[in-house]
Image (spheres, rainbow, N blue to C red):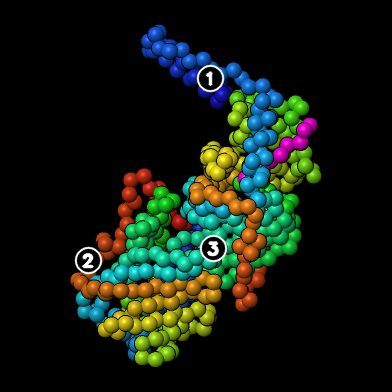
Amino acid sequence: MRSGRRAACAIALAGAAALALPACAPHRLAPPALEEGQVRARFVRALAERAERARAVEARVALWPHSASRGALPGAEAVLLLAAPDAFRLRVGSSFGTALDLGAHDDSVVAYVPSRRLAVRLGAAGESLGVRSPAAVVCRALGATWNPDAAAWAAPERSDSLLVVRWLEDGDSLALGVGTSGLPRWARIARPDGPALDVRYPAWSWVDGASWPTGVALSDGGGRFQVECRLRHVRFAARPDRRRLAVVTPADAGRLGWLGLRRALERLEEL
Amino acid sequence: MTPRTAAAAALLVALLPAPCRAAAPADSAATRPPLVATRALVRRLAASGRAEVSLTRESVDPLSGRAVRLRGRLVLEPPDRVRLDFPDTGERVTLRSDGGEWLQRSLQQMLRLDPAHVAPALRWWRLFLDRGGDRFRERSFGPKEFVVVPRDPAAGGDSVRVVLGAGGLPAQVRVGGPGEEAVYRLADWRFSPARGRADFVLEAPPGVQVIQVP
């Protein structure tokens, strides 16, 4: 129904424009639809450029979370280190210090909250979070390094101006919407009977010889919670600095499990 | 409130600028002698009503290892008003017993804080606003250097190191633990009559989203 209304509006607008515009205005013809092969070729070339750079990325990130039930939540700033394919560090803070230092490598996650001297170390974070190799998922989401297999490109769907490809990886089902530029517009990863992650790429920038996603919106499959990320000062390095990727927790920091950390954060409001 | 919502809000509120983060015991009647570390400041504040001081926050970025300097201004008015302005970043914070605001220009947002959010940070700022002897104890390291800790052992082991300068006024406040240490250098103290609560209430500039912290 909504798409029907949209189409009706578009038709009405087009009609009004046709009446209002002088007939002598230069004609603008819509570009011909790209062949699927051309889109794929552009995608593969751009992906290769991103994948190479995603091995060592540093950026400043503004984060705006949004809850379906509560609306806009307090935003935050962070520094992001990305070391694709399977490591990242995110330090969330402000002028007054670090709120959360989060690092992940493959299936292990370390989180540290300096203001409370609380640390979490999870060796098999995927089990706790319900996501296989969470670090790899974050790397792929933020670097847009989704890589559909050849079979996925054999029969892509069309959705508006996008090509949509679908494929399976280790039981996860993935889908990717690719624009005519060859850049991803959205991606979705879902586990059977598990959580889903939707990623949108509303903004891209040309950084150091490659298109890089500088606007990324992450949301759970149900749309209950979303984080809009805006990246700036994106820099690439030849190789990642593994020391900088490691979250160091003081020896006297309290140790919690994942659920313990969540409970502790919830209790902070009562202090 | 969902756990995720609460967690996100709590993380940010925990960053409210305070000399240190540990919870302090509740206020009580001033029966102990005032702290030497803040005695001159508290006396002059009581006499004038308002203090302003130039502030430089120095810390080391834990990721890059680079020194970070942030210049700003601190304003204090007894019994419960604190204001911090950082012109370079456009960041402003006000704390009062009845709440506060935190303007973050880089995020185009202003957080409204209720008394419960503000209380932990404000209790520490009261170290500079009133006698403080009932809630804190101090150890001296010479005539001009003191370490102040909460009297309540349940408040944790955090401490504030205060170095006094001219006129016995705080010239340096060192806070935070390993890896998160910050030094606030205070210079050019000025005292004047109080302007009142209105000077400690922020209005959101046009285009800035106001968010009530859950």
Secondary structure beneath label 1: helix
Residue A187 located left or right of residue A17: right
Report the chain holding disc 1. Answer: A
Q: Marks 3 and 1: which is nearer the front? A: 3
Q: Are marks 1 and 2 on the same chain?
A: no
Report the chain holding disc 3. Answer: B
The amino acid on which the numbered mark 2 sits, given as a three-letter code, is Arg
Secondary structure beneath label 3: loop
Numbered label attached to residue B64: 3
Placement of the N terminus of chain A among the 4 image quadrants: top right
Of the pair A263 and B29, the residue shown nearer to us: A263
Of the pair B51 and B5, the residue shown nearer to us: B51
The image position of residue A33, as x and y in percent, is: 61, 20
Q: Is residue A111 magenta?
A: no
The amino acid on which the numbered mark 1 sits, given as a three-letter code, is Ala
In primary-sequence order, the first of circles 3 and 2 is 3
Question: Marks 3 and 2: CB-CB under 8 Å?
Answer: no
Task: Give the prevailing secondary structure in the magenta stretch.
Answer: loop
Q: Are marks 3 and 2 on the same chain?
A: yes
Of the pair A235 and A76, the residue shown nearer to us: A235
Q: Residues within 10 Å of mark 3 (few under 14, many from 20)?
A: few
Residue B54 located left or right of residue A13: left
The image position of residue A232, as x and y in percent, is: 50, 48
At horizontal 73% and vertical 57% (from top left) the residue drawn is A107
Residue B125 image-quadrant placement? bottom left
At horizontal 66% and vertical 25% (from top left) the residue drawn is A38
User: The magenta stretch spans which residues?
Assistant: A143-151
Q: Residues within 10 Å of mark 1 (few under 14, many from 20)?
A: few
Give the CA separation, mark 3 to mark 1.
Answer: 51 Å
Numbered label attached to residue B195: 2
Numbered label attached to residue B25: none
